[in-house]
Image (tube, rainbow, N blue to C red):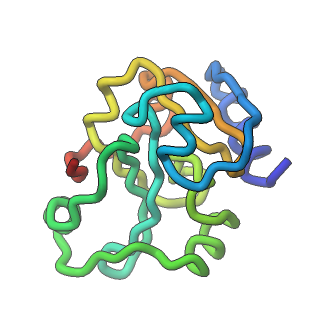
Amino acid sequence: MSDVLERLTAALEGGGITYQKTQHAAVYTSAEAAAVRGVSLNSGAKALIIKGGDAFLMVVLPADLSLDSASLRNVLGTKRIRFADKEEVLKITGLTPGSIPPFGSLFKLPTYCDERLAVNERINFNAGSHTVSFQMKYSDYVRFEHPQMVRVGKP
C-alpha cells in the first residue's frame, strides 16, 4: 500500500468518513477510470496540481471538464498559472499524475473544487494508485476537505 493511500485511509477513517475501496486494472485517464469503475465520467474527481503565481495548489474538477485557465487566473488574482510537471508532482505528492486523490490537505496544498462536482451524490477518484479507487459521498468530501468552491472548468 502506498504511503498516500495509507494516509488517506487513516484520515478518512479518523474523520468518520465512509468510503468504498475498489481494486482494478491500472488506469491512466479519467475515461479509463470511469469505464473500469462502471460510473459516469462526470462523477470522477480529477485532481490537478497547478502552480499559480509562486505557489502550488490543487484544483479538483469533474472528470468530464478541463481547466479553464483564464477563470483560474481570475480566481487566484494572478497572471501566471501552469500545470506542475511530472517531477514537481512527484516531489509534492510522491505520486504520478493520474493517481492523485482530490485532497490537497494531504499534501499541504490549498484545494479549489469546481462547484459542478456537486451534481454527483457520490464521487470517484484514484486513491494514490492507478489500481485503487475510492467512492464517497460528495457531501462528506466537502465536509472533510473544506475546499474553496470555484467555477474553473470548461467542457
Vertical placement of residue 85 versus 6, above or below: below
In the image: residue 114, left or right of residue 22 = left
Vertical placement of residue 133 versus 65, above or below: above
Vertical placement of residue 135 versus 128, above or below: above
In the image: residue 37, left or right of residue 63 = right
Vertical placement of residue 94 versus 140, above or below: below
Residue 78 position in % (x across, y down): 19, 75
Residue 23 position in % (x across, y down): 76, 34
At horizontal 73% and vertical 37% (from top left) the residue drawn is 24
At horizontal 43% and vertical 28% (from top left) the residue drawn is 40
In the image: residue 89, left or right of residue 84 = right
Residue 66 position in % (x across, y down): 30, 55
At horizontal 64% and vertical 72% (from top left) the residue drawn is 90
Residue 103 position in % (x across, y down): 53, 47
At horizontal 57% and vertical 63% (from top left) the residue drawn is 97
In the image: residue 61, left or right of residue 107 = left
Q: For residue 146, what is the image quadrant?
A: top left
Tally the numbered discs. Answer: 0
